[in-house]
Image (cartoon, helix red, strand yellow):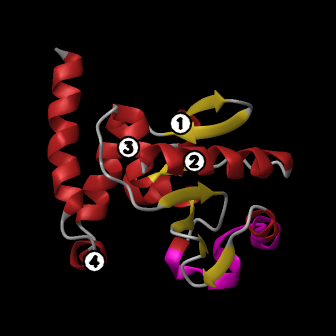
Amino acid sequence: MYHILLKEFLEITKLLNKIKITPALMGSVGLEYATDESWNPNDLDIHVPGNPLGWEAPDEDRIYNFEEIERVMEAVGYSLINKHEHEFKKDTISVEFGCIDTLPEFAGVPLNELKKETIDGAEFFILSPNQFLKLYEASAKDGYRNDNNNSKDFEKIEFLKQHIRSVDS
């Protein structure tokens, strides 16, 4: 599923790039991309510019240029199924949009330190293993994620700590 999701991400990213949006590949697909470790992703998490207040901002203000993003998603066959979560669906693929601008405050990851990648003309940001570790450690303190994510974040944290140690040695 990883390769299918990555291909979808690149297709979506090329269209976002045309409207001057450089997204970040997040979630299990982003982590697998950054570490070459399989995380059996089942959806796509894409972060784009938005209100740094994140979930504290009203749904309609959380993601900047959301109407344009919605048009892009519809152009590649997706339908908006949850406006609060900014979630789209096409066949068996779910794509959720989040706000990249919450990373500095939430996880201590400065946006100017994100790595920019280009694949097949699609330009996007990716977190390093260290940045993913900071993000998952911050997420692990979030009761909602723990209740709804089967503690997968803790597995990722342990993996990332070992991965980073092995790369540093």
Disc 2, SS: strand
Q: Earlier in the sequence, mark 2 or mark 4?
A: 2
- Marks 1 and 2 sit apart, C-alpha to C-alpha, by 9 Å
Identify residue for label 2: 24
**SS of the residue under disc 3:** helix
Q: Which mark is residue 114?
A: 1
Position of residue 86 measured from the top left corner of the image (x, y, whole percent):
60, 75
Give the residue drawn at x 64%, y 57%. 48
Q: Amino acid at mark 3?
A: Leu
* Viewer-closest of 155 and 120: 120
One can see residue 48 in this view: yes
Q: CA distance from mark 2 to mark 4?
A: 23 Å
The residues colored magenta run 55-70
The residue that mark 4 highlights is 148
- Mark 4–mark 3 Cα distance, whole angstroms, equals 19 Å
* Quadrant assignment for the C terminus: top left
- Who comes first in sequence, dot 1 or dot 2? 2
Q: The disc labelled 2 sits on which kind of residue? A: Ala
Q: CA distance from mark 1 to mark 4?
A: 27 Å
Tell whether position 60 is magenta: yes
The Cα–Cα distance between marks 1 and 3, rounded to whole angstroms, is: 14 Å
Residue identifier under label 3: 31
Q: Mark 3 near mark 2, Cβ–Cβ under 8 Å?
A: no
Q: Do labels 1 and 2 touch, CB within 8 Å?
A: yes
Question: What amino acid is found at the position of numbered circle 4 in the picture?
Answer: Asn
Say whether disc 1 or disc 4 marks the residue closer to the N-terminus.
Answer: 1
Q: 17 left or right of 109? A: right
Q: Residues within 10 Å of mark 4 (few under 14, many from 20)?
A: few
